[in-house]
Amino acid sequence: MTEQIERSEASELPGSKNVGHSDGLTNDTVPTGDVVAQATTPRLDGPLRFALLLLRAGPVLILILLVVVIALVTPLFLTPRNLGNVLAQTAVIAVLSLGQLLVIVTRGIDLSVGSTLALATVVGALMFQAGNSSFLVIASMVGAGILVGLINGVIFVKGRIPHPFIVTLAMFTLVRGVALWLSDGRPIQGMPEVVQAIGGDSILGWLPISSFIVVAVAVAVWLLTTRVVWGRWIYAVGGNPEAAHRTAIPVSKILISVYVFCGLTAGIAGFLTAGRTNAGAPTFGNLAELDAIAAVIIGGASFLGGRGRVSHALVGALMIGVIRNAMNLANLDSFFQLIVLGIVILLAVESDVLRGYLENKLRLAQAVRT
């Protein structure tokens, strides 16, 4: 009697193949749990994959939609001169975002890039006033950025600081203070002609030369992250630091190197800013770090690390430039730019959460099917 009850209970378990004949079904005709999963999963895979595709292409689609809407509302937007202004205004953000991308991929953040940009312009202006050559002026600006990045990386790694937020926040204040001290709190006029040409001139009457610097830096970052072992190590460290340690990846050196590279891009951004303004000033780059971080996050990178693309970071930077340019054309107050940018960042972060949720659902569906 007990054995009959156990067999009866077992026959009612989900996915059990020991089904009784009281339902009028045989063992060969009753779908098990695996068969049901196989029957339903293909129907789920399609919508999940399509939703993920939309989320991953979201920054590009949003940028295209923005351009179309703004062009319809403001015909001046698509004029060559205005497009040149957008590219010129976006160049600095784009260069900063490329360095910030590598830091965020490793689960870090650099809040000092705006201050580093300002310091680079001040150092370059002082070098020019001292009668140094154009090469030394440019090298000093880039070198100032590299030095700040090296300090960030070394203190974070060797000092065993829990998170780079603390280090770079301190450097955010310290570096800005150094720039104010060196310049006596005032702008310093004058830059070499080559710096002015690269930072402020254009070709064809509208295409800024600075956009070619952005392309060159972007290509360099793309090559480093896709064709060099160092780039693969960066994503490995960001994706799983413990696993990276166990596979003998030099995690400490990788982390220091990404902050050095981020400082390098801040120095280049300072060089472009100084060329465009023909000056060095301790107030340059105010909130530039937030623009760079926003561009990377809008472009689909994750603060959890291991994810981020060069092309999408550029799209994020361009999106910020387009939004600001459209507001300027519409004569809206500047504080609206901060409001809109904040909303865009929140949407980008939420889309990253949704993307992670959908990816987990898709992996679960595939695991059940197999």
Image (cartoon, rainbow, N blue to C red):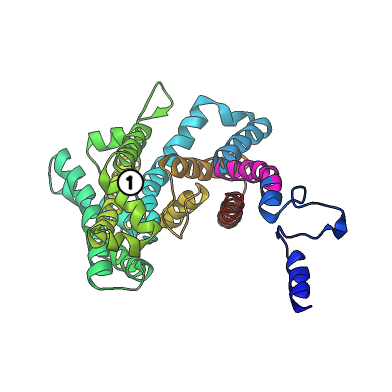
Q: Which residues are magenta?
A: 39-56
Figure check: 227 above or below 249:
above
**324 magenta-colored:** no
Of 71 and 168, nearer the camera is 168
Residue indicated by mark 1: 269
| Res. 21 visible in picture | yes
Toward the viewer: 25 or 150?
25
Residue farthest bottom in this picture: 2
Q: Is residue 210 above or below residue 92?
A: above
At 38% across and 57% down in the image, what residue appears? 238
The number of numbered badges drawn on the structure is 1
> Which residue reaches farthest top?
204
Whether residue 122 can be seen here: no
Where does residue 301 sit, x and y in percent of width and height? 47, 51
Q: Is residue 350 left or right of residue 301?
A: right
Q: Amino acid at mark 1?
A: Ala
Magenta residues, dominant SS class: helix
Instruction: Give the image quarter of residue 74.
Output: top right
Residue 181 lies left or right of residue 35; in this view the side is: left
The structure residue drawn at horizontal position 63% and vertical position 41%, both measured from the top left corner, is: 50
The residue at the point 22 percent across, 65 percent down is 154
Which element carries disc 1, helix, strand or loop? helix
Q: State the image quarter where residue 209 is shown.
A: top left
